[in-house]
Image (cartoon, helix red, strand yellow):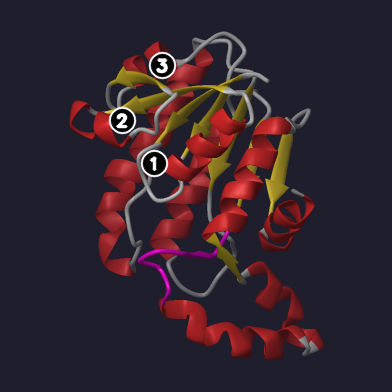
Amino acid sequence: MGSVTVTGGTGYMGRSLIERLIAAGHQVTALARASSTGKVPKGARIVEGSALNADDIANALTDGCTLVLLVGTPHPSPSKAQQFQEVDLASVRAAAEAIKRSSVAHVVYVSVAHPAPVMAAYIAVRTEGERLLRETGVPLTVLRPWYVLGPGHWWPIALIPFYKLFEQIPSKRDTALRLGLVTHAQMVSALASAVDNAPAATRVVDVPAIRAASDRR
């Protein structure tokens, strides 16, 4: 198994992913602020620093590693447009700069499903993040969930019957699938699968593919 560096490793999906990767035999480095190092799962190498600082990210990278980018504003909403710029996009800009001066072999980035009729500011930032990472020339896997159901993130579960209905209507099926819900477990499985299967250039993993990756594991 190879080496993996994770930013955002103490967050919603990061801790579970790190635990999964360590259990599978990967050597994992977590970049974390000093105040958050206690949240990093046991077995990971910890590098103290900020995911908004290119030097700190570069310091956490190892030769030929996979870099997983999970930094993001918690509970995104239209009212958080400024945070998307100051945190989400700033972290990708810093990562892209660090990647260009390193020997990273593969980047895994959690974006968002698009196009979509809402969350324009969030989608714009994540789309720009995809562009910045593609321009590094490093093989890139982009995961595009719409909403990830899990602890503290259950409110859309009431919409599942409507999704099922729309999936049966030919004119709405593609949209319903692209903007479908995935679970926390499915996302962690899809991220782990992405780490293990680097593409030659850029690969986009949409909602149906996220669900399929979970089914295969």
Helix, strand or loop for the magenta stretch, by majority: loop
Q: Which residue is label 1 attached to? A: 71
When asked about the image quadrant of residue 1, the answer is top right
Measured along the vertical axis of the image, is residue 167 above or below residue 43?
Answer: below
For the residues labelled 2 and 3, the Cα–Cα distance comes to 13 Å
Locate residue 105, reporting x and y percent. Answer: 64, 19
Q: Is residue 180 left or right of residue 18?
A: right
- Kindly state the secondary structure of the residue where label 2 is placed: loop
Residue receiving disc 3: 60
Residue depicted at x 46% and y 73%: 118
Q: For the residue marked with disc 3, what is the amino acid? A: Ala
- Which mark is in front, 2 or 1? 1
| Dot 2 or dot 3, earlier in sequence | 2
- List the residue tagged with mark 2: 52
Q: Position of residue 214 (x, y in %)?
A: 70, 54
User: What mark, if any, has residue 127 been given in the picture?
Assistant: none
Residue 16 as seen in the image, left or right of residue 165: left
- Is residue 149 shown in magenta? yes
Q: Is residue 130 above or below residue 65?
A: below
Q: Name which quarter of the figure residue 25 lies in.
A: top right
Disc 2 versus disc 1: distance between alpha carbons? 9 Å
Q: Nearer the viewer, residue 31 or 54?
A: 31
Q: Are marks 2 and 1 in contact (CB under 8 Å)?
A: yes
Q: Which residues are magenta?
A: 144-154
Verify CB contact (< 8 Å) between mark 3 and mark 1: no
The 10 Å Cα crowd at callout 2, few under 14, some 14 to 19, many 20 or more, is many
Q: Around disc 1, counting alpha carbons within 10 Å, would you say few (fewer than 14), some (14 to 19), or many (20 or more)?
A: many
Magenta-span inclusion, residue 160: no
Mark 1 lies on a secondary structure that is: loop
Q: CA distance from mark 3 to mark 1?
A: 15 Å
What percent of the width, then of the height, locates residue 176? 67, 77
- Residue 209: name its quadrant: bottom right
